[in-house]
Image: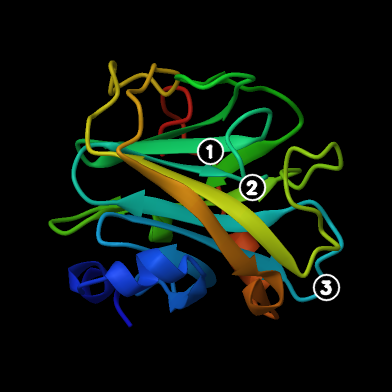
Amino acid sequence: MKLSSLLSLSLPLLATAQTAAPYTDAKSGITFNAYVTSNYFFGLALPENATGSDFIGTIGGKGTGWSGASLGGQMRNKLLVLSWPNAQAVLSSFRKTAQYGSPAVATGTFTQTPIANGTYVNSTHWTYTFLCSNCIQTDGTTFKSSDTTASIGFAFSATAPTQKTNAGSAVSKHTSQGLVTFDLTKAKNANFATWKSWAAPKVARGFEA
C-alpha cells in the first residue's frame, strides 16, 4: 500500500494498538516493518541474518514539523533520530539526552547515510530513508541485534525546529509520543544487501539529505 494512502486513512486503531506492520515504500521498493499514524511514520529493515549493527530506517510525516524515534524505547539516555523537512530537502541528526527537553546532538561510531530514492518531499508527506551504520549498540541505548522484538519510542511535533536549516537545531516539545512494539523478525529481508548498496553520502550541510 502507498504511504500517501496510509496517511490519508483514519488511523486511531493503529495509534491505539501501537504495533508495527509491513510497509513497502512506493519509490524505493524497500520493505519495512513500520509504525504509521496520520502524521508520523517510522520503519526498520534488517538483514536476513541480523547479527550485525546496521539497519535501514525510514522516518517522516506530514507538514513542516519534526519526527523522532528512540531506538531504545524511552527518551532519556537512549539513541534518538530526529528529522524534518526543509523545502525539498530533509535534515536529520542523532540525539541523546539525560533529561526531558530538546535533546543535544549525539556523536559516536554510528552514522546515517541517505538512500536517495527513498528520500523525498511531496504534496502529501516527507520521507527520509537511510542506512544506519553501527546504530545497534550494546550499551543499552538501542535494541539488540539478538532481539526478536523491540520497543521503539516515537515523537512528533507539528512545529518546525527553531533553525530549520540546521540539523543540530533545538526542537519544541513533541505534540504526540508513545512506544511501539516492533516484531524484528518481520523486519528481516533477503534484499537488505541490495538496498544497503544504494546508500550514498550527499555533499551538503551537516546531515542534510
- Left or right: where 86 falls relative to 26: left
Mark number for residue 93? none
Whether residue 85 is visible, yes or no, is: yes
What residue appears at the point 22 percent right and 69 percent down from the top-left corner? 4
Specify the amino acid type for callout 2: Cys
Mark 3 falls on what kind of element? loop
- In the picture of the structure, the residue carrying the numbered disc 2 is 132
Q: Is residue 137 above or below residue 100?
A: below
Using the numbered discs, state the Cα–Cα distance from disc 3 to disc 2 in whole angstroms: 16 Å
Q: Is residue 106 left or right of residue 158?
A: right
Q: Earlier in the sequence, mark 2 or mark 1?
A: 1
Instruction: Locate residue 125, reporting x and y percent.
Output: 23, 55
Please indicate whether residue 159 sits to the left or right of residue 189 in the image: left
Q: How is the image coloured?
A: rainbow
Q: Residue at position x 25%, y 36% from top?
A: 65
Query: Mark 3 or 2 closer to N-term?
Result: 3
Find residue 209 and report its image quarter.
top left
Proximity of marks 2 and 1: CB atoms separated by less than 8 Å: yes
Which residue, given by chain and number where applicable, does mark 1 sit on? 81
Looking at the rendering, which quadrant does residue 171 occupy? top left
Which residue is labeled 3 in the image? 49
Give the alpha-carbon distance from disc 2 to disc 1, as whole Å.
Answer: 10 Å
Q: Amino acid at mark 3?
A: Asn
Please name the amino acid that badge 1 sits on. Answer: Val
The residue tagged with tag 2: helix, strand or loop? strand
73 to the left or right of 117:
right
Q: Residues within 10 Å of mark 2 (few under 14, many from 20)?
A: many
Give the label, 1 or 3, closer to the camera: 1
Instruction: Please identify the quadrant where the N terminus is shown.
Output: bottom left
Secondary structure category for the residue under label 1: strand
Badge 1: residue crowd in 10 Å (few <14, some 14–19, many ≥20) = many
Report, in whole angstroms, how far the alpha carbon at label 1 lies from the one at label 3. Answer: 24 Å
